[in-house]
Amino acid sequence: MNREQAWALLCEYTSSENLRRHALAVEACMRHYARLWGEDEELWGIAGLLHDLDYEQHPSLQEHPFVAMEILRQRGYPEELVRAVGAHADHTGIPRQTRMEHALFACDEITGFVTAVALVRPNKKLAEVDVAAVRKKMKDKAFARAVSREDLLRGAEEIGMPFEEHVQHVIRAMSTIAEELGL
C-alpha cells in the first residue's frame, strides 16, 4: 500500500476533477493531523484520499461507502483503513472509535466547506480564507446548504479541538496543496 497505488485506485473509480480535489484536500488534512499527533502519516493520508472512492459511481446511502470498503478489502488494504472509510459516514452505523476515524470525519465536510468559502472570495484563493470568513459563511443558511453545520462542529468536538483551531489546521493543511486544489 503506497500513495501512488492509492491515487491510481482513486482515479480508476473517480473521473470528476472536483471529487479528486476533495480527496486531495482530505488527504492533506489527514496527513497534517497525523504529523501533529505522531501517527502514521501514510496510512492516514491514504484513508483521506480513498474515503469517497465509490462516491461518483455509487452515491446512494445504500451503497456509499460500503462499495468502497469492499473494493479496499479486495485490494488488500488494512482493516483499520477500511473501517475508517466506513465510519466517516454516520449512516453506515459504524461507530467511530479510533483517532484516525474521528479525524477522517472531522476533515471530510470541513474541507468542502472551506473550498466553498474560497471560491466565493474575490480571487478564489485559499489564501483569502480565514476562520472569521468560515464562521460568517456558517451563519448563512443558504450558503453550501447541503453541508451540515452540526457535523462541522461535531467533527472538531470528536477530535477534542475547539472549532476555530480545527479550521485553522484545515486551512493550513489545504494551503500546502492550494495549487493542486485550484485555489
Image: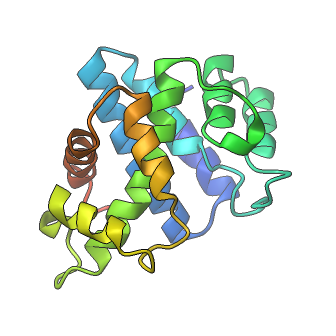
- Residue 169 image offset from top left, x and y in percent: 23, 41
- Residue 112 image offset from top left, x and y in percent: 43, 61
Task: Say if residue 182 shows up in the picture.
Answer: no
Q: Residue at x 45, y 40 (%)?
A: 154
Find residue 134 and report its image quarter: bottom left
Q: Residue at x 67, y 41 (%)?
A: 90
Instruction: Reply above or below: 100 against 152.
Output: above
| Viewer-proximal residue among 143 and 128 | 143
For the C terminus, give its image quadrant: bottom left
- Residue 46 image offset from top left, x and y in percent: 50, 34
For the N terminus, give its image quadrant: top right
Q: Residue at x 37, y 16 (%)?
A: 39
| Viewer-proximal residue among 125 and 143 | 143
- Residue 40 image offset from top left, x and y in percent: 40, 17
Q: Is residue 102 left or right of residue 178?
A: right
Q: Is residue 131 left or right of residue 32?
A: left
Seen as rendered, the residue at the extreme top is: 38
Seen as rendered, the residue at the extreme bottom is: 122
Seen as rendered, the residue at the extreme right is: 62
Q: What is the tally of numbered marks visible in this picture?
A: 0
Instruction: Reply above or below: 31 against 58.
Output: above
Find residue 89 and report its image quarter: top right
Q: Residue at x 21, y 79 (%)?
A: 121
Task: Say if residue 9 shows up in the picture.
Answer: yes
Find residue 124 and report its image quarter: bottom left
Q: Is residue 178 left or right of residue 69?
A: left
Q: Is residue 84 left or right of residue 3?
A: right
Instruction: Reply above or below: 169 against 180.
Output: above
Colour mode of the rendering = rainbow
